[in-house]
Image (tube, coloured by chain):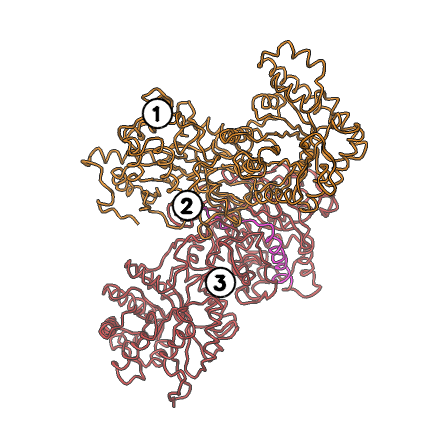
Chain colours: A red, B orange
Amino acid sequence: RHRYSKKTEIAHSNNISGKSDSSGASNSGGESSKESSRSSTPVLDTDRTDRLRDKMRRRTESGDHWFSLEFFPPRTASGAVNLISRFDRMGSGGPLFIDVTWHPAGDPGSDKETSSMMIASTAVNYCGLESVLHLTCCNQTKEKITGYLSKAKRLGLKNIMALRGDPIGTDWEEEEGGFNYATDLVKHIRCEFDDYFDICVAGYPTGHPEAQSYDEDLKHLKEKVDAGADFIITQLFFRADTFLKFVRDCRAIGITCPILPGIFPIQGYQSLRQLVKLSKLEVPEEIMRVIEPIKENDAAIRNYGIEHAVGMCRMLLESGEVPGLHFYTLNREVATMEVLRQLGLWIEDPRRPLPWAVSAHPKRKVEDVRPIFWASRPKSYIYRTQDWDDFPNGRWGNSSSPAFGELNDYYLFYLKSKSSKDALLKMWGEELTSEKSVYEVFTSYIMAEPNQAGHKVMCLPWNDEPLAPETNLLKDELAKVNRRGVLTINSQPSINGKPSSDSIVGWGPPGGYVFQKAYLEFFTSSENVTALLQVLKKYEPRVNYHIVNVQGQNTTNAHDMQPNAVTWGIFPGREIVQPTVVDPVSFMYWKDEAFALWIEQWAKLYEDESPSRMIIKYIHDNYFLVNLVDNDFPLDNCLWQVIDDMFELLDVNPLEQPVDGLSLGISFD
Amino acid sequence: RHRYSKKTEIAHSNNISGKSDSSGASNSGGESSKESSRSSTPVLDTDRTDRLRDKMRRRTESGDHWFSLEFFPPRTASGAVNLISRFDRMGSGGPLFIDVTWHPAGDPGSDKETSSMMIASTAVNYCGLESVLHLTCCNQTKEKITGYLSKAKRLGLKNIMALRGDPIGTDWEEEEGGFNYATDLVKHIRCEFDDYFDICVAGYPTGHPEAQSYDEDLKHLKEKVDAGADFIITQLFFRADTFLKFVRDCRAIGITCPILPGIFPIQGYQSLRQLVKLSKLEVPEEIMRVIEPIKENDAAIRNYGIEHAVGMCRMLLESGEVPGLHFYTLNREVATMEVLRQLGLWIEDPRRPLPWAVSAHPKRKVEDVRPIFWASRPKSYIYRTQDWDDFPNGRWGNSSSPAFGELNDYYLFYLKSKSSKDALLKMWGEELTSEKSVYEVFTSYIMAEPNQAGHKVMCLPWNDEPLAPETNLLKDELAKVNRRGVLTINSQPSINGKPSSDSIVGWGPPGGYVFQKAYLEFFTSSENVTALLQVLKKYEPRVNYHIVNVQGQNTTNAHDMQPNAVTWGIFPGREIVQPTVVDPVSFMYWKDEAFALWIEQWAKLYEDESPSRMIIKYIHDNYFLVNLVDNDFPLDNCLWQVIDDMFELLDVNPLEQPVDGLSLGISFD
């Protein structure tokens, strides 16, 4: 993203932040990235250490209605990539939690991209969402279940929805000492893991289809709660009264925990029929009367479904019996989001505790500083630091800086580009003829204009998000520098004390002030670097720089161990928070990743030895990655002037051909 | 100190900072204190971890002349108090180091206030001065010497001046296996402590009086250096030529280490005669010719001494052989400071790495955050935290906050008031008749006007420094609130991004910006507190407060574990530094000290059961200690408005008599 897309970008970032990761807040050559570093205070949000049941209790006590969202694991890896993007988007509305169903046929506890376990883990660790993992116990050994729970705990999951699950085959019989009911699973969790997990169980407003009677089923529910469940989510229902009666009946037999209504916005005729068949529910006459006549018109049914759900939810909320609503999304966004918007529960501008989204993993919750370099690739940062044992004092610093994870697994689903190879070739060029072709790709991306082949460039290897279409004052400046081979991949503007509530750049608690130093990061040729180093002498000590090539030849005027804080906030009654730094140590790890993306995402689109591939390879081998910080945040950003000065020097004193900086006697450490 | 004394105070603070403690930067009810807390970055000044010999080498290489100062241990405890104040004042000129002579007859290795060991330790730990401890070995056992060295190391001393010392009695003979020469001591230090200490040895420009010959003495010096000495300080001399010849002779026999000339500004006729007798030096004819005729005129002799020393120093520095000058101060200030000023070596405005002076103890060097409460009592803070084992990441925080030392030893020499009991009684009242008398003492202090008995109030128990005489815009405001019983003891104004080079409020490296939140701390009655709490509701969440009485009944709107940063700085290429915080945990320790000072320093001036004592005791027992932070640092300080509102409320709705806040149903945690 670029400065000129700032408003939209931040709006988008707001959409997906709060609870989601900050891939939407990242940028390329522009003015809005915020990522990484080293800060002073552990934890802005003291709630972050809280358990789900505590959050629920506090929200209930304050009368602040919430919502939660249910998803199921996708069938394919590309489905997983899409679902994660959906987590980011739907996470931005501020769900109290999401839950991921257990899919026994899909190897649910495995490390597959599509497993229930990995999807829930991704939601927690990479999207920063409080998550509940479903678990069914039917036909499972205790060892197997304990193994799943241990793994879930290891992955940072803290909440389990304990279910019996459907027995395989119809002739199911109770097994001596085995898991016969969800109650057994609840007991097992409490027995093996004490109070570690928050446990949710299912409630059936019209009774479980297999139960002997409604009352019998209520007794089973009471047993589940008595065994240690913390709250109940109900099966879907079609009438508010059904749920409200159910709650009254639960209370009457002594069930006191929260009971969340499961809301199913009708989204289509087929999905309704299928669901009804599975759940053995009856669709009320009055609904069928509306739907049958329009069953061929998906849009009409969805609109009706939204209207019906909104009406039912209003009744539920107004009853005073319902602290929050649980939505069966069917992995779709539109209907649920619309219902939530109409109810006023969708948080359009959730307060961001930090400029980047905080992981919901219990260990990473205290993390409050990150390097800026991964601003556009927050999931990659989390992935490469996943083995870090601790973030001392929530800080990440040189002295204690553990190694970054290996640079591999480019196609791990949460690092994967959303675009296909074909789409990428169209955007980045079926055939490249020179370095200039590459400059044009960057320029098209910046300008949000079609490339020469007529395709819009929606992403770059360092920026998976399409550029916002709005024009911006800086668009021409950016296009100019990219056209001349200053290939911008990340930047942020300077900010001198904007209110933390600022809708564009604000973050953190209310009543505070946020600050930034201007930042610019780009690839450029050694010829340009030679001129740049000359120019930078004029900007000492105002501008700090790091300039490195793929071999790691590094020149800098910064302290080799001292991070430079580039985003910080001052809040009432708090220590200073400095969530984003330019850190010299991590820059060398980022450098590997940034250069590797040329090859892995771009060069490999072309055949071995093809000219296109050789061009990208040449850039990879010969260009430098440069970052610049303007330390004088109260003044106007001088970094564009630095680049202009560099071009001016090149224009006045053109070098015959690109010369390696080293051969000019510039000293690289 | 108060806001209206800010300029002078900071000037003074600059005088004594850099290397000294910040007692001069502290204040009372005014607007300038800076102390304590919790910060993000370890160590602003990367040089702080360096050894004396490295600092010396770098200064020599850069051609940046330095000076050092020699002191001897005082004979009395009150002499020690005065010497420490002198350390603070003379430390402000920027000496590279000070050294403290070893006084064998004064129990030099003991814990006495007057011992060489304790004076040197105080210079390092409390005044933040790089210090060299002299040590003489003559007639000492190896065990004894090793014991002294171990203790010195434990106390944070890192440099030893190794001397033989004068044998007791005249018939000294070499002792087999004992310490016969300084060389033996140098060898012993290197043998027992490896390279831990930097070692200095003495050189004699005209040969040691007991040496067989000048050449023989030079050989001994070479042996001392070869045994492991890092640099040489010479005995005093009266002609530049004498020293320069000595240096040439040293170099000729292969002595390559720094040789610092010992400069002795003649300060009086008697002291010169005595010194000449002790050192067996001859005063040159041309000097005696000047001095003899004016020997009754101390001022004239001192002026001549200054002129002579300046002339000699100029010759030495111009020779290019002299990287720095060592001054024999005889524990006096005027002459040496004047020589240094004329030479341009006295640093009038040394850059302060942090708002408060950093201790020179190796362990405490990384400390970069302190509570604001001890702003006026930095030595007390160091004393009470001396047992802390580490300052994790240079940070001092709740989670790792070790206990503060016991509140005792009020009369430890570095906590002792410089004023006598008589002087205090004159300032604070021979007899108090009511609380109002106390208010008047505070008001006189603020106004820098004589009290009713005609004595100027130069200090208060919480502020040992006299108030600067300048008027200030806030003087009337402060006097008004003190007169009405808001007894201010500490404060600072808000600062919104002043350059770090600002001569009044700047600190830290150049090119940065410094910030402050306004702070106000005072004692006041429960009646006032009742109104204040009412008023403070209007200022939520802008103003954070802590209100506590001597029993520890505490009411606050701040997080009970979260410090509030009130001083911070943003610097090029650095993380944020936040050297001063209002910390809720340490406030409870400070509270004990702040209340105890009423009794220990004030009430105890009066007889048991006397009305005066009862009045102070009443205040101690019934008043509250209040601190206020205005979080909105970019706006005008609202804290004075808060106090005005409180008075207004009291005026509109006067309570018949002081009422305990508790009885009004105010909840105290």
Q: Which residue is mark 3?
A: A126
Q: Which residues are magenta?
A: A574-603
Mark-to-mark CA distance, 3 and 1: 63 Å
Q: Is residue B186 left or right of residue A22?
A: right
- Secondary structure of the residue carrying numbered label 1: helix
Labels 3, 1: one chain: no
Disc number at residue B586? 2
Q: Nearer the viewer, mark 2 or mark 3?
A: 2
Residue A583 drawn in magenta: yes
Disc 1 residue type?
Ser
How many marks can you see?
3
Where residue B361 appears, as percent x and y from the top left, is 56, 42
Q: Quadrant of residue A100?
A: bottom left
Secondary element at tag 3 = loop
Q: Quadrant of residue A514?
A: top left
Q: Amino acid at mark 2?
A: Ser
State the residue in front, B567 or A136.
B567
Q: Position of residue B380 (x, y in %)?
A: 46, 39
Badge 3 vs badge 1, beta-carbon distance below 8 Å: no
Tag in front: 3 or 1: 1
The image position of residue A3, as x and y in percent, is 50, 48
- Please give the residue where the numbered disc 1 appears in the rendered image: B444
Work out whether disc 2 and disc 1 sit on a shared chain.
Answer: yes
Q: Is residue A615 above or below residue B348?
A: below
